[in-house]
Amino acid sequence: MNKVYSEAGSALDGLLFDGMLIAAGGFGLCGIPELLIDAIREAGTKDLTIASNNCGVDDFGLGVLLKRKQISKMISSYVGENAEFMRQYLSGELELEFNPQGTLAERMRAGGAGIAGFYTKTGVGTVVAEGKEHKSFNGETHVLETGIVADLSIVKAWKADASGNLVFRKTARNFNPPAATCGKICVAEVEEIVPIGSLEPDQIHLPGIYVHRLIQGKHEKCIERVVVFMDHTNKAGESKVLKRCTLPLTGQGVVDRIVTNLGVLDTVEGGLSVVECADGVTEDELRRATEATIVN
C-alpha cells in the first residue's frame, strides 16, 4: 500500500466534507501541520469542528481557517494570541469547548485507544465540568470526560519512512501523537521521508499503523511572541536591561516584550519603547534604571 502522496491537496482528496471533526497536532506554532491546513483552506471545507490545543495565530496555522470562517467550533485549551479567535468567540460566531490542556491530550489518547471515557479531578467545580457526570472515587469528586474520535487527523513530524513510521523533533512532538491516533484517517506531513529500514525501532515515536497518508514538504519556521519576565536591576541597583547582553545567548533578536518589577517595555527599531510603568514608578525612574536605549 503506497502511503506517500505528492502534495497536501492530493493527500486529502476524498477525505474532506462539511461539518467534519478534525484533530490537529501542534502546540502554539510548534509542530503544526501547516501544509495540510493550507490545503483545507484551498478546498473550502466549512462548518468544521477542530480539536487542537490552540488555533495558531491570525495569519498562520489554523488561524487561516478561522479567517475564512471555515471553523464553526473549537475544542481547545488555549485561545493564545489569536485576535480573530477571540473576536469570533466573543461575538458568538464561534463555538468554543474549553478543555484543560492535559484533559484534551488524554481525550485524544483515549479516543485512539478505544476508551470511550475517563474520570478526572481536573476541572471539578469550574465551568468545564458543567453539565458533565460527576462521581466520587476515594472521597474525591471526579468529572467524566469522553474520548475524542475524529473523522480526520492531521499532524506534522520531522522524519518518516515510506510505511508511515514517524519521528518528531523535540517539543514538536507535543499534541501530535495523541492527535494522530484518534483519527479514523491520519494524514501526516514531514520534512523528510527516508527509506524503509533506515529508522531505528527505538527512534520511532508513532508506528506507521496509525498513518494512512503521507507527504513531504518545505515548512516555514515561525517563532511566537517572546516575553521575558525579570527584575529590572540586580542587588547592587545596576540595570539588567542592557544595550548588549554579556551572557551567552540562546537566541538573538527574538524578545518582543520585557516585563519587570518597574514596568513593561517593547522592543522596537532602535531600542525599547515604554508600554507602562508599575504602580508607584514614574517613567523617569524607569528610564534611569534602564541601560538600553528607550526611543519614545
Image (cartoon, rainbow, N blue to C red):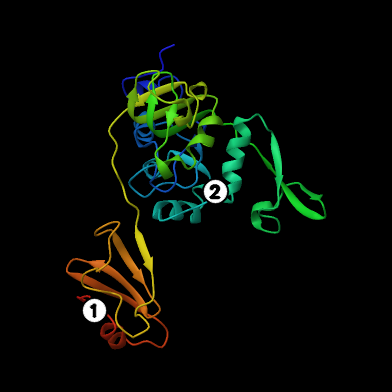
Callout 1 secondary element: loop
Camera-nearest label, 1 or 2: 1
Identity of the amino acid at label 2?
Leu
Q: Position of residue 125 (x, y in %)?
A: 70, 59
Callout 2 secondary element: strand
Which image quadrant is residue 106 in? top right
Q: Is residue 189 left or right of residue 175?
A: left
Identity of the amino acid at label 1?
Glu
Q: Can residue 20 be seen by looking at this rendering?
A: no
Residue sticking out furthest to the left: 270
Marks 1,2: beta carbons within 8 A = no
Q: Position of residue 188 (x, y in %)?
A: 42, 28
**Residue 116 against residue 27 in the figure, above or below:** above
Residue count near mark 2 (Cα–Cα under 10 Å), binned few <14, some 14–19, many ≥20: many
Q: Nearer the viewer, residue 188 or 243?
A: 243
Q: Can residue 189 be seen by looking at this rendering?
A: yes
Residue count near mark 1 (Cα–Cα under 10 Å), binned few <14, some 14–19, many ≥20: some
Residue sticking out furthest to the top: 1
Q: CA distance from mark 1 to mark 2?
A: 44 Å
Instruction: Point out which mark residue 291 bears.
Output: 1
Q: Position of residue 25 (x, y in %)?
A: 46, 38
Residue pictured at 45% horizontal, 40% vertical: 173
**Residue 137 against residue 3 in the figure, above or below:** below
Q: Position of residue 259 (x, y in %)?
A: 37, 72
Q: Is residue 273 left or right of residue 179?
A: left
- The residue identified by callout 2 is 96
Q: Quadrant of the C terminus?
A: bottom left
Residue pictured at 50% horizontal, 42% vertical: 52
Q: Quadrant of the N terminus?
A: top left
